[in-house]
DNA sequence: TTGGAATATTTGATTATTATTATATTACAA
DNA sequence: TTGTAATATAATAATAATCAAATATTCCAA
């Protein structure tokens, strides 16, 4: 069993292991977005968005397109959306600490 | 956009963000295994396996069945395997730092 | 050419994760 | 009962990830 391969797979899941990064990917479902658009949609500060974009970039989950001073991001492989969909299904199946999650969601 | 929901999704992916934990899940594909079996298959020390099982348990990815002094683990939701399959596809699509990965894999 | 908008990077303090080692617990067989 | 195999938990040092704030860079328009 190749340890390196599993380390890389773990790195891939690490890229997804952050709320803002997941939000960014979900936001990129419909279409590419530039950083300012992401900032506004996600109501997050510039630096935070850029930092998390950097993580996603470093793991090759997203690609960029420059247009003047704007940088447009999009998801490199549509399978990533499929992955998020499966994760959502698992989630809906009450997988993750259902009791706690529900009670926390109620308080929002 | 519910922050809590995304935090929980991130927690879920965190559970997958560790080589040994991925290996454990892959090992449980065919059938349930007890801790000693996992130790042997994965060539890892007892404590390490137990600790990572604890993480997977705490995120509800796996369930246990006790039989005397043995504890048998299995994956709670088969969709988790589907998730791993999609991740593998993404991987095969050269998503993750292909250059580095390949050269490292060659040295094994 | 310079000022500003858009984006990226750096820094450092804080918190979380990992890995190792040691110690507890539990259930059974002798 | 007691010893032992199986498993879990605790302690903790080392490493990595996060967050916020400040600073850099880049590109364009005026």
Image (spheres, coloured by chain):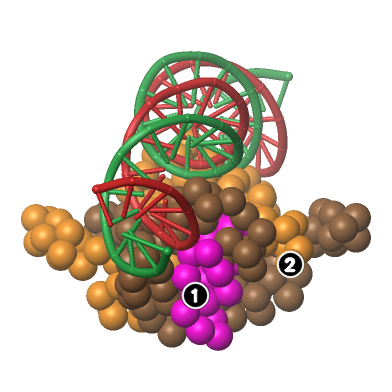
Chain colours: A orange, B brown, C green, D red
Magenta range: B14-37
- Residue A85: x %, y % from top left: 43, 79
Within the image, what quadrant is residue A106 found in?
bottom left
Give the CA distance from mark 1 to mark 2.
Answer: 17 Å
Within the image, what quadrant is residue B69 found in?
bottom left
Residue under the point 76% across and 63% down: A2
Residue A11 seen anywhere in this rendered image of the structure: no
Q: Which mark is residue B33?
A: 1
Q: Main secondary structure of the magenta part?
A: helix
- Residue D21 against residue A9 in the figure, above or below: above
- Provide the chain ID for the residue under circle 2: A
Q: Is label 2 in a helix, a strand or a loop? A: loop
Q: Was residue A7 drawn as part of the magenta stretch in this picture? A: no
Q: Nearer the viewer, residue A50 or D10?
A: D10
Q: Was residue B16 drawn as part of the magenta stretch in this picture? A: yes
Q: Residues within 10 Å of mark 2 (few under 14, many from 20)?
A: few
Residue bearing the label numbered 2: A1
Q: Nearer the viewer, residue B3 or B21?
A: B21
- Residue A33 against residue B92 in the figure, above or below: above
């Amino acid at each position: 069993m190749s340890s390196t391969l599993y380390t890389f797979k773990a790195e891939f899941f690490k890229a997804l292991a952050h709320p803002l990064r997941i939000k960014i990917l979900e936001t990129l479902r419909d279409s590419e977005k530039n950083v300012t658009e992401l900032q506004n949609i996600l109501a997050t500060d510039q630096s935070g968005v850029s930092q998390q974009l950097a993580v996603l970039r470093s793991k090759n989950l997203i690609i960029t397109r420059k247009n003047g001073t704007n940088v447009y991001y999009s998801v490199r492989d549509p399978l990533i959306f499929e992955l998020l969909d499966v994760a959502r299904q698992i989630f809906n199946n009450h997988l993750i600490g259902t009791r706690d999650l529900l009670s926390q969601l109620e308080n929002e």
